[in-house]
Image (tube, grey):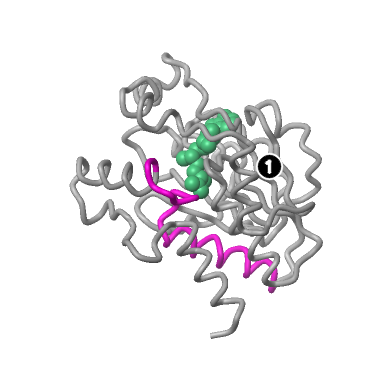
Amino acid sequence: MDAKALYLDLLAKSLTNTLFVNEPDSDQESQAQFVKSFIEHYISGSAITMLPMARIENLRNCIINTIERSVPGDLIETGVWRGGATIFMRAILKAYEVSDKIVWVADSFEGLPEPDAELNPIEHKAYSGPVMTKVYKHFAVGLEEVKRNFAAYGLLDDQVRFLKGWFKDTLPNAPIKSLSVIRLDGDFYESTLDSLNNLYPKLSRGGYVIIDDYGEESWTECKRAVEEFRSKHAVKDELFKVDSNCYYWQRA
Ligand SMILES: C[S@@+](CC[C@H](N)C(=O)[O-])C[C@H]1O[C@@H](n2cnc3c(N)ncnc32)[C@H](O)[C@@H]1O
């Protein structure tokens, strides 16, 4: 194995906090046990991303594939929490000595927006529940903490740009020319649709769009947003499964 691969493997384990312990496994644990493990490992633990390793590997493959095929455009994640997936994006560019792509880090840095109770009742209920409010704290992590995390890994530089605010406000005027990988992890219907509407037109042919919460139907309506978008814009590209929640497609 070459040094690049070793570096990215080690980084992935560090960012997911799986060097010495296993990640929580939603397929192996009961729902109650999984929530307990999730809180211990991610929320009160030191993981910098809550992505399972399968999704980190999917992100890595998509980015390396676009680099190797010279697909033009930057990388973006909308919804970053502690920043781990975007730190990994920057690390891949560094390892592959790519200096003409930017990593865009888009988040409110204040947590999830409150969904409309009438339009998105499932999400509103989840947003208002005790675990989301008191334990997850709507996944709010401040911009300075995310910048510190980038700096801790030696990856805070001018190839990283932060878009602070609600996606509906920041994405329409973001100075992004084109994109090769779009990773959507804003959980909710509106967050997903705002991201797709504003970013998909900038996705290069051969680029990827990854939807973290497509399969999660118990508390988000992300899937409906994706289906509406694909139907409205006649997107026929095949959706591939990463794991029970995460799906992606490649723009033909
Ligand atoms: C599940 S977390 C993201 C996890 C992250 N990708 C990781 O690697 O661990 C969801 C994030 O989306 C952000 N978010 C959701 N909807 C948003 C919106 N409409 N505008 C801005 N930020 C949003 C929240 O602040 C939160 O940081």
113 left or right of 33 in image: right
Which residue in the rendered view is the most extreme toward the top?
118
Residue 243 at x, y = what percent?
A: 38, 57
User: In this rendering, is residue 162 above or below 88?
Assistant: above
Return the residue at label 1: 199
Q: Main secondary structure of the magenta part?
A: helix
Would you identify the image quadrant in which residue 174 lies? top right
Which residue in the rendered view is the most extreme toward the bottom?
1
Tell me the SS state at disc 1: helix
Name the residue at 69% across, 73% down: 68
Depth check: give the residue in front, 119 or 164: 164
Q: Which residues are magenta?
A: 43-68
Quadrant (top left/top right/bottom left/bottom right) for the C terminus = bottom right
Depth check: give the residue in front, 120 or 237: 120
Residue 56 at x, y = what percent?
A: 49, 60
**Is-magenta flag for residue 143?**
no
36 left or right of 121 in image: left
Q: Amino acid at mark 1?
A: Leu
User: In this rendering, is residue 134 above or below 242?
Assistant: above
Depth check: give the residue in front, 64 or 15: 15
User: In this rendering, is residue 148 above or below 126?
Assistant: below
Using the rendered image of the protein, determine whether residue 228 is visible from the camera's viewpoint: no
Name the residue at 62% across, 64% down: 63
Using the rendered image of the protein, determine whether residue 155 is visible from the camera's viewpoint: yes
**Is-magenta flag for residue 53?**
yes
Residue 49 at x, y = what percent?
A: 48, 50
Name the residue at 38% across, 49% down: 245
Name the residue at 67% across, 62% down: 206
